[in-house]
Amino acid sequence: MKRRADGDRVVEPDMRIERLRSEQNRKMASSAHAYVRGSTGRFYEWLEASERPALPQGPNVWICGDCHVGNLGPVASTEGRIAVQIRDLDQTVIGNPAHDLIRLGLSLAMAARGSDLPGITTAHMIERMVGGYEAAFLPEAEGEMVDTSADLPDRVRLVMRRAAGRSWRHLADERIEGTAPSIPLGKRFWPLTEAERLAVNDIFGGEELRRLMTSLRSRDDDAPVRVLDAAYWRKGCSSLGRLRFAVLVAIDKGRAERHCLVDVKEATATAAPRSPTASMPEDHAVRVVTGARGLSPFLGGRMMAGRLLGRAVFLRELLPQDLKLEIEQLSREEAMSVAEFLARIVGRGHARQLSSDNRRAWLADLQRSRSKSLDAPSWLWNAVVDLVGAHEVAYLQHCRRYARQAA
């Protein structure tokens, strides 16, 4: 019999959109930083409309497109290595790397405001962010993939230590409330239609996905794969109108059988602007997977593009070591060290796609347009300031609308 989470009402398929919209509005009203995370489309609209000098046109590389703090964190490779990388690539495009810098700067500035840090800390934080980003383009940084413990800010070091000690049981307890071979329906997981269930079984019966699922070093390459259970997944603010499934899978059989959880997510058009001269895959799922392999090799190596019910979807197994960096309250020193480190991670994702000559050229561009007293380029600082103001106003208006609807 299908498990149900205690006290949670199950949402039937015809009620998904209404419930998802309500949950999205609630989450975006919870804090100004949460509003930034959920308003990617508006970020690019405001950035385009902002009255400021033009941005530098960086080299054509795969960018995250939605580069905020919550989209970075520890990620495990198929070989078992762990590194902090970009962990959400829905918006990835070949575009201007300056857009990732601005979005990360906005996210960090809003986190600083949420931590009641003074504006002077934000100014120094943006400077440290630029220094960290530029460090990824220096000759000695070429080929970097992981960081030593000594290079990590204290906040990040704790998350990495936690990630390294996690097992399947930790992931199962967090995601599906235990290791039973079923997904509990309730607040987070909702029932599938019969057509959705058949489509899930069909895509998981393919040889390409079986090879991906057995690619981890601890698994037999010839092991069979079968679906144990599947459910619609209400996750984050991005599920509105999209397919989003959690699939519990058994790999191998008998005493060697192991369980894992796979995230199946529909890929749709991006809000992030692509370079007009770039050639990208037309299939959105192939775009996401290709961008992930360029920006975040550990994650991209565990992803696959496919079709489900006529829609483009990408699939990835969730590993216990994959964690989000939760940065809600920061001290002054933490804010600056985290800003520098995360910007270096983003820079590393951009730099690994470029030749040595192109890395030097982009670094030279970044070092222009600076004042004598501040190291952050004026275009970056002015864009972040403009966007902080625009997001503050929009956030308060959103909260007012949400309060009215709730009343």
Image: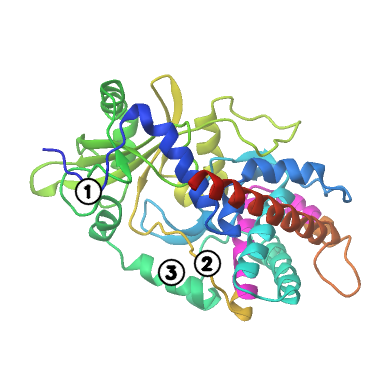
145 versus 125 height, above or below: above
Residue drawn at (19%, 35%), measured in percent from left and top? Answer: 224
Amino acid type of the residue tagged 2 in the rendering: Ile
Amino acid type of the residue tagged 3 in the rendering: Val
Residues 244 and 134: in front is: 244
| Residue 128 visible to an observer of this rendering | yes
Which of the numbered marks, if any, corresponds to residue 5? 1
Q: Position of residue 141 (x, y in %)?
A: 64, 64
Which of the numbered marks, if any, corresponds to residue 159? 3
Q: Which residue is mark 2?
A: 327
Residue furthest left in the image: 254
Q: Is residue 337 magenta?
A: yes
Q: Judging from the image, what secondary structure is the residue with disc 1 in?
A: loop
Residues 200 and 233: in front is: 233
Question: Tag 1: Cα neighbours inside 10 Å, few (<14), some, or many (≥20)?
Answer: some
The N terminus sits in image quarter:
top left
Which is in the foreground here, disc 2 or disc 3?
2
Which is in the foreground here, disc 1 or disc 2?
1
Left or right: where 201 falls relative to 354: left
Q: Position of residue 189 (x, y in %)?
A: 30, 42
Q: Judging from the image, what secondary structure is the residue with disc 3 in?
A: helix
Which of the numbered marks, if any, corresponds to residue 273? none
